[in-house]
Image (cartoon, grey):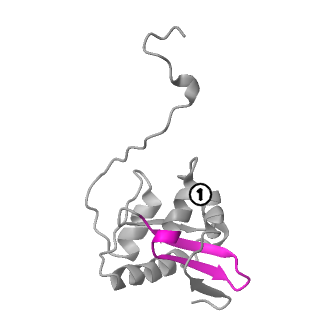
Amino acid sequence: MPKGFYSDSLTEKDAVVMDSVWAQRHIGSVDFLKMAIKMNPSTGIFKDDGELIAWSIFLETGAMGNLQVKKEYQRQDFATLVSQLQYVKIIKMGRVPFGHIVHQNDASFNFSTKRHNATWIGNNSWIGVKKKPKSELLPLWGHL
């Protein structure tokens, strides 16, 4: 660990910081992150003053997810470090570390294949279900 930094498990309060820079954030994503942190192993890298700068969580699907480094700390090998620390936790659980990469996220794909000798298995699509607002729930005949 570089001088001035330490690693620890994430807490639910870290979810707000994580969500603020997450490209896939959405309505309810802070609650999703809090639940993932509460229920599964996670790893964060913090500055000695407690600032969260890099993190990785374990998703409900069994995949590693939300690997992120704050922009000002990128390209300093924190992504490699936090992912390796998280890999160790997953392996100690008797699980095989794997992850999902959003289509066309070349940076994540290149990181995974170069740093971790990952193998690309194939493409997946995910479907989200969103509750419609009450104003869109009309009777079948549509005139009320």
Provide residue 86's location: percent of width, then percent of height: 45, 79
Indicate whether 135 appears above or below 5: above
| Nearest to the observer: residue 116 or residue 5 | 5
Q: Is residue 68 magenta?
A: no
| Nearest to the observer: residue 73 or residue 129 | 129
Q: State the count of labels.
A: 1
| Nearest to the observer: residue 51 or residue 105 | 51
Task: Examine the image and state in which quarter residue 34 appears.
Answer: bottom right
Say which quadrant the N terminus sits in: bottom right
| Nearest to the observer: residue 41 or residue 47 | 41
Provide residue 26's location: percent of width, then percent of height: 56, 48
Please give the range of residues in magenta: 38-59
Viewed as shown, does residue 14 lie left or right of 126? right
Q: Residue furthest left?
A: 121
Q: Residue furthest top?
A: 143
Indicate whether 131 appears above or below 85: above
Residue sitting at x 42%, y 51%: 104
Q: Residue furthest right?
A: 49
Number of residues whose C-alpha sits closer than 10 Å to that of mark 1, classed few (under 14), some (14–19) or many (20 or more): many
Q: Is residue 48 magenta?
A: yes
- Callout 1: SS: helix
Provide residue 66's location: percent of width, then percent of height: 49, 64
Viewed as shown, does residue 54 lie left or right of 63? right
Q: Amino acid at mark 1?
A: Val
Task: Examine the image and state in which quarter residue 127 appears.
Answer: top left
Q: Mark 1 — residue?
A: 30
Residue sitting at x 32%, y 71%: 118
Residue sitting at x 56%, y 77%: 44
Provide residue 48's location: percent of width, then percent of height: 70, 86
